[in-house]
Image (cartoon, rainbow, N blue to C red):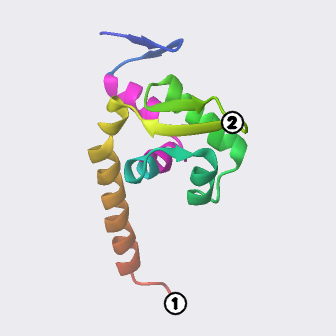
Amino acid sequence: MLLINYKETEYYNSKDLALSVIGGRWKIPIIWHLLQETPLRLNQLEKKLPDINQRMLIRQLRELEEDHIVSRTVYPVVPPKVEYSLTEIGKDLEPVVNGICNWGDEYLSFLQSIPKEQ
């Protein structure tokens, strides 16, 4: 068996590795918004994701940056200007993210078709 070592963690296959990179409550929504419009500043992402607090958003963006999914550009101006965009490997997630979103639409329709108990 081939073990994959990445960021001090061992993965048994590439699927586990992929899920560790894009898994979690906020990473898919962040990637989805960056696929729709890029680059985005932190405050723009906060407006698009009103249920996430700034600390969690920054943490998720840092993890995505460490995994080379998102790039962060800092402009040398006052006040500081920082923009986030997808890297090339991040853009490759488009069919995956769209597939998850489409499945979500189908699942919602399924849930709405289930008769409600009286």
* Residue drawn at the location 35% of the way across and 74% of the way down: 109
| Element type at mark 1 | loop
* Residue drawn at the location 53% of the way across and 41% of the way down: 24
CA distance for labels 1 and 2:
56 Å
| Element type at mark 2 | loop
Q: Relative to 50, does residue 58 appear above or below in the rendering?
A: above
Q: Quadrant of residue 16?
A: top left
Characterize the magenta stretch by its predominant secondary structure.
helix
Q: Relative to 24, does residue 49 appear above or below in the rendering?
A: below
Q: Badge 2, how many Cα within 10 Å: few under 14, some, many 20+?
A: few
Chain-order first, disc 1 or disc 2: 2
Q: Position of residue 67 (x, y in %)?
A: 47, 25
Q: Position of residue 14 (x, y in %)?
A: 32, 23
| Left or right of residue 41: residue 39 | left
Q: Is residue 9 magenta?
A: no
Q: Quadrant of residue 107?
A: bottom left
Q: Position of residue 65 (x, y in %)?
A: 51, 28
Q: Looking at the image, which is closer to me, 55 or 41?
A: 41
- Badge 1 amino acid: Gln
| Residue ID for mark 1 | 118
| Residue ID for mark 2 | 80
- Badge 2 amino acid: Pro
The magenta segment is 14-31
Count all numbered tags in the image, as a single digit: 2
Q: Badge 1, how many Cα within 10 Å: few under 14, some, many 20+?
A: few
Q: Relative to 50, does residue 43 appear above or below in the rendering?
A: above
Residue projecting furthest to the bottom: 118
Q: Looking at the image, which is closer to me, 85 or 59?
A: 85
